[in-house]
Amino acid sequence: QVQLVESGGGLVQAGGSLRLSCAASGRTFGTYAMGWFRQAPGKERDFVSSITWSDGRTNYADSVKGRFTVSRDNAKNTLYLQMNSLKPEDTAVYYCALRWRSTEYNYWGQGTQVTVSS
């Protein structure tokens, strides 16, 4: 089993920044990648960004490219999402997810709320 705990969400004005963290614990050996997803009210959960655990290859949704940066600290088993130049449309619950010996994300955190005011 793997447990994921997100933190760092909150309320910020448009143009501001936030950094999300996701701490992984349990049987993390064998992690292929971790990612961030978000879900706005009344919408489906969307992919935001991901990073492979071994070599740090990153991927971003077009809507966040150039504004968000994903990173990881392998020693701490922690995933980060630095969010800059935030926009009201970035408002959502942000979820951390992990791919453990799978082609799909099979572990999820509980989510953290990010609210960007205009």
Image: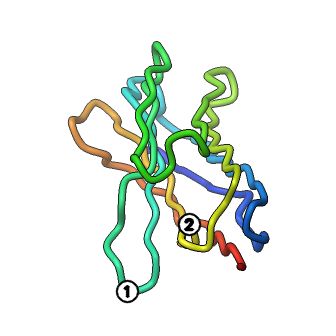
Q: From the viewer's side, name the closer residue of 83 and 50.
A: 83
| In this rendering, position of residue 7 left or right of residue 89 | right
Mark 2, secondary structure of its residue: helix
Q: On screen, 35 above or below 33?
A: below
Mark 1, secondary structure of its residue: loop
Q: Position of residue 74 (x, y in %)?
A: 61, 22
Q: Position of residue 116 (x, y in %)?
A: 68, 73
Name the residue located 61 percent from the left edge and 73 percent from the top edge.
88
Q: Give the mark count.
A: 2
Q: From the viewer's side, name the closer residue of 28 and 45.
A: 45
Q: CA distance from mark 1 to mark 2?
A: 14 Å
Name the residue located 31 percent from the left edge and 48 percent from the top edge.
106
Q: On screen, 46 above or below 42?
A: above
Residue picked out by circle 2 = 90
Neighbours of disc 1 within 10 Å: few (<14), some (14-19), many (20+): few
Q: Earlier in the sequence, mark 1 or mark 2?
A: 1
Q: On screen, 34 above or below 105?
A: above
Q: From the viewer's side, name the closer residue of 98 and 35.
A: 35
| In this rendering, position of residue 104 left or right of residue 35 | left
Name the residue located 45 percent from the left edge and 53 percent from the top edge.
63
Q: Position of residue 61 (x, y in %)?
A: 40, 47
- The dot on residue 42 is 1
Q: Amino acid at mark 2?
A: Asp
Q: Amino acid at mark 1?
A: Gly
Q: Quadrant of the C terminus?
A: bottom right
Neighbours of disc 2 within 10 Å: few (<14), some (14-19), many (20+): many
